Amino acid sequence: MKLRSITFRCTAAQFNRLQQAMQEEYSETRTSILSAALEEFLDYAERGEMQRLNLFDLVQHLDGLGDGIRFSDQA
């Protein structure tokens, strides 16, 4: 598999959450946390019923789960 780099900007809230996750998980790199998060999200989004949702419906569905911070408010 040929690996490719991705660069993106994030909000201060996202950066702070990433820094917190690095401290809590004792992860060596931001890349490892972002890669794990992306893999988990893609695994979830590829489930049978989730595959039929568009991105907006998927976010709305995620917002309805649990009592944590709304997915759409985390950016």
Image (cartoon, rainbow, N blue to C red):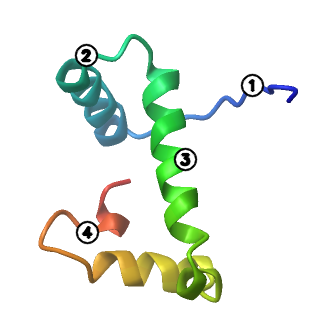
- Helix, strand or loop status at disc 4: loop
Q: Which residue is mark 3?
A: 39
Q: How many marks?
A: 4
Q: Position of residue 41 (x, y in %)?
A: 50, 57
Q: Earlier in the sequence, mark 2 or mark 1?
A: 1
Q: Residues within 10 Å of mark 1 (few under 14, many from 20)?
A: few
What residue do we see at 52% from left, 23% from top?
31
Q: Which residue is mark 1?
A: 5
Q: Earlier in the sequence, mark 4 or mark 2?
A: 2
The Cα–Cα distance between marks 1 and 3, rounded to whole angstroms, is 16 Å
Image quarter in which the N terminus is found? top right
- Helix, strand or loop status at disc 3: helix
Q: Position of residue 50 (x, y in %)?
A: 55, 81
Nearer the observer, 62 or 15 = 62
Nearer the observer, 67 or 43 = 43
Residue 12, compared with residue 45, is above or below; it is above
The Cα–Cα distance between marks 2 and 1, rounded to whole angstroms, is 23 Å
What residue do we see at 18% from left, 25% from top?
24
Is disc 4 in contact with disc 3, using a CB cutoff of under 8 Å? no
Q: Residue furthest right?
A: 2
The Cα–Cα distance between marks 1 and 4, rounded to whole angstroms, is 29 Å
Is disc 4 in contact with disc 2, using a CB cutoff of under 8 Å? no
Q: Earlier in the sequence, mark 4 or mark 3?
A: 3
| Disc sitting over residue 26 in the figure | 2
What residue do we see at 39% from left, 10% from top?
28
User: Looking at the picture, which amino acid does disc 1 mark?
Assistant: Ser
Marks 2, 1: nearer the viewer: 2
The Cα–Cα distance between marks 4 and 3, rounded to whole angstroms, is 20 Å
User: Looking at the picture, which amino acid does disc 2 mark?
Assistant: Tyr
Q: Which residue is mark 4?
A: 70
Which corner quadrant of the image does residue 74 belong to? bottom left
Which corner quadrant of the image does residue 73 belong to? bottom left
